[in-house]
Amino acid sequence: MSIDDQLARLDHHDPEFGRDPYVVYSAMRERCPVAHSEAHGGYWLVAGYDDVAGILKDDYTFSSAQGVTFPSVVGANPVIPIEVDPPEFFKFRRMLNPWFSPARIASWEPAVREITTSLLDGVAAAGEIDFVQDFGRLLPGIVTLRFIGLPEKDVVQWLDWIHQLLHFSIDDPESTVRVGLQCYGAMWQEMSRRREAGETHQDDLLGFLLHTEVEGGRRLLDEQIMGIVFLMLFGGLDTTGAAISNALWYLDHHHGDRRKLAEDFSLIPDAVEEFLRYEAPVQGLHRVVVKDTVIGGCPVSAGEHLYFLMGSANRDEREFDDADSVILDRKPNRHLSFGVGAHRCLGSHLGRLQFRVALEEILTRMPDFRLDRENCHRWADVGIVCGFTNLPATFAPSGPA
Ligand code: HEM
């Protein structure tokens, strides 16, 4: 089949595509950087760095109000602020920004380290770990629930719910509705508990959202609060776990790079950016065209759907030298893994913090880890999240570091 025929049928949710999307991206950038596929009722796929960045930066031409996944996995109640277009969007974003500022997130480092070390120390003596099941999914799960102010004991339940909603909603819409209602029920329960107990503290995000005032002294509506909390869970859990898992997969192959990082932790922040570039946890996002325009020389019309590929943009040789190689200290590194423009990831500093601390503590406790590569598995659908579901490993057992 010719590349044009393949692109005409391309479906970013297809497990076949997910097996090696980078081959397809490379062919697209070379031959057809803006391609039309007939899948999902028809949509455009955009592969080049400049075009992807241009779409991300232009919220007046490209709307996210119909969801950033395609087809959308989110229900009738919008998740906020990602599914709100300007100018209304700015009201929410301004309200939330201080919660995610670099200084505020830096104050989370002791908590992130404490959660990281207690998870790793729990398995250190055994000499065996599944880096996803025992660690990579739990760290962002616990951090995000603490940040929001939802009970941490429910972390596994929340992870299961969010996975169902993100990964299985297209194939199993009935369960998705049921799980969505369970999520709203759990949020509602905590909001009601706080109201009945007369709690007015604002030291977690939920407390802030319950008591803050927007425009003209009005409180947020309950559905708006739940839309914001939902987005933190969608945005914070699988993405961060996937990023950590992709780096560990790479380091399992590349012992020289692993040694460099283990010997000098000051290299880790740049390495984190490079791992994020090399395998974008969010490979692509969806927008709807609001007014007729041209992308990369290709006319697109109002009402059409776009799926633009940060996973491809991050490998574009016109932006990154030797784009298919990991260069630990790559500079500059203007990767698009957190997006760019108004909707740029609100949680990027929190995601980076967890990623850095996870690498530091893993390389301290188990620098010799070896993955059981035969039994490592990725999410089959890279159209949702690009990362692993299982990374079983062994290492020399030790006591707590
Ligand atoms: C490595 C980890 C992460 C990656 C790769 C990632 C990726 C992204 C991307 C690509 C966007 C842009 C969406 C768009 O333009 O439509 C985004 C937005 C967002 N992310 Fe993240 N994210 C990560 C971690 C987090 C964390 C830890 C949180 C919060 C706890 C979070 C919360 C959000 C929120 C709230 C938005 C929406 C911002 C807005 O619409 O203004 N993310 N993220």
Image (cartoon, rainbow, N blue to C red):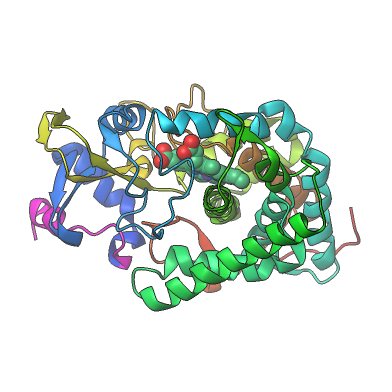
Task: Give left or right: position of 59 versus 326.
Answer: left
* 296 vs 64, nearest the viewer: 64
Name the spot of residue 266 as percent of width and height, x first: 72, 30
Q: Is residue 21 magenta?
A: no
* Image quadrant in which the N terminus is located: bottom left
* 374 vs 354, nearest the viewer: 354
* 9 vs 247, nearest the viewer: 9
Residue 285 visible, this orientation: yes
Q: Is residue 8 magenta?
A: yes
Q: Quadrant of residue 219?
A: top right
Q: Is residue 18 above or below residue 324?
A: below
Q: Residue at x 24, y 59 (%)?
A: 11
Task: Give left or right: position of 72 versus 339.
Answer: left
**Tally of numbered tags:** 0
Residue 329 visible, this orientation: no
Task: Give left or right: position of 112 versus 80.
Answer: right
Q: Quadrant of residue 95?
A: top right
Q: Which residues are magenta?
A: 1-15
Name the spot of residue 53 as percent of width and height, x first: 34, 29
Q: Residue at x 37, y 40 (%)?
A: 310
Name the spot of residue 248 as percent of width and height, x first: 60, 53
Q: Residue furthest top?
A: 332
Name the spot of residue 186 as percent of width and height, x first: 64, 66
Q: Residue at x 77, y 53 (%)?
A: 116
Q: Quadrant of residue 59?
A: top left
Task: Give left or right: position of 73 versus 128.
Answer: left
Q: Is residue 37 above or below residue 189?
A: above
Q: Residue at x 49, y 57 (%)?
A: 387
Q: Is residue 101 above or below residue 9?
A: above
